[in-house]
Image (cartoon, rainbow, N blue to C red):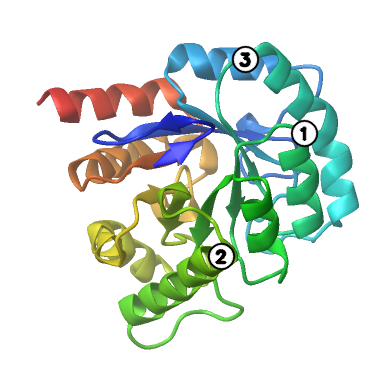
Amino acid sequence: MIIGGRAFKNYTYVMAIINLTPDSFYAGSRRTCDDVLFATEKAVKDGAAIIDLGAQSTRPGYAEISAEQEISRLEKPLRLIKEKFDIPVSVDTYFEKCAAFALSAGADMINDIWGLTHDSGMAATIAKYNASVCIMHNATNKVEGDLWQNVLSFLKHSADIAIGAGIDRDKICIDGGIGFAKDREQNFELLNGYDKLHTLGYPSLLGCSRKSMFGGLPEDRLKPTVEATRVAAKKGVLFVRVHDVKENAKAIEEVYNG
């Protein structure tokens, strides 16, 4: 996969979560303009290959903010990071307006939790900027019936939207959407069969860092997150999106070095 002119292949890379929000479910991921450069520097030092900026919490029960509010939270931190660091930056948004701003300000990828289906112009905007995209499975209501049929059909449709809009095939990755429209059992079914996503012909991203499927408090979920990263690395997942870069990068290295 190509992101920001860089090729990612034959490994499992760490995408570092940096949330520009006051209400993300894991307090340790929340950043402001005052500490975003420090957080980015630490992530890079610890082994992050990509930074993922989020300006809206999408935790269960979240209260949606507007695209304008996302932009106001994102504008200065994004520019600071792009000025100071030579690392690809992904922006987590499902608003086309926010995506257009982010890409114009130097972002390299859009991470869309609605798989290009929320805003009809999203795919065209990403194509316009020759950017990369991560398309995630999601649904308004909990998935019923065959989990894999639901996930794979949604992702195929979203990928077809991307290709149809002119997004390069080698700039697309897919995310099964752990924690979105799925119960705990479904989340683990998805995790344990994650390589089934590869039947669609695109690289994958796993995002389950410190999520409620692991039980307990967010602060106590590092160990199971690292174990999930090990599973991802063994299955050939291209990216893991995590809060704790150093620990997950170490786990990946151990898997690949055997």
Answer above or below: position of 69 versus 47.
below
Query: Quick one: label 2 or label 3, which is nearer the N terminus?
Result: 3
Query: Residue 67's quadrant in the figure?
Result: bottom right
Mark on residue 115? Answer: 2
Residue type of the residue flagged with mark 3: Phe
Q: Residues within 10 Å of mark 3 (few under 14, many from 20)?
A: few
Query: Quick one: label 2 or label 1, which is nearer the N terminus?
Result: 1
State the residue at coordinates (50%, 61%).
Answer: 136
Q: Residues within 10 Å of mark 1 (few under 14, many from 20)?
A: some
**Residue receiving disc 3:** 85
Q: CA distance from mark 3 to mark 1?
A: 14 Å
Q: Position of residue 137 (x, y in %)?
A: 49, 67
Query: Residue 112's quadrant in the figure?
Result: bottom right
In the image: residue 245, left or right of residue 201 = right
Q: Position of residue 248 (x, y in %)?
A: 36, 29
Q: CA distance from mark 2 to mark 1?
A: 22 Å
State the residue at coordinates (54%, 56%).
Answer: 167
State the residue at coordinates (34%, 51%).
Answer: 203
**Residue receiving disc 1:** 105
Viewer-side residue, 115 vs 170: 170
Which numbered disc, 3 or 1, marks the residue closer to the eye?
1
Query: Quick one: label 3 or label 1, which is nearer the N terminus?
Result: 3
Judge whether residue 36 can be spotted in this image.
no
Viewer-side residue, 66 vs 162: 162
Residue projecting furthest to the bottom: 145
* Element marked by disc 1: loop
Residue type of the residue flagged with mark 2: Gly
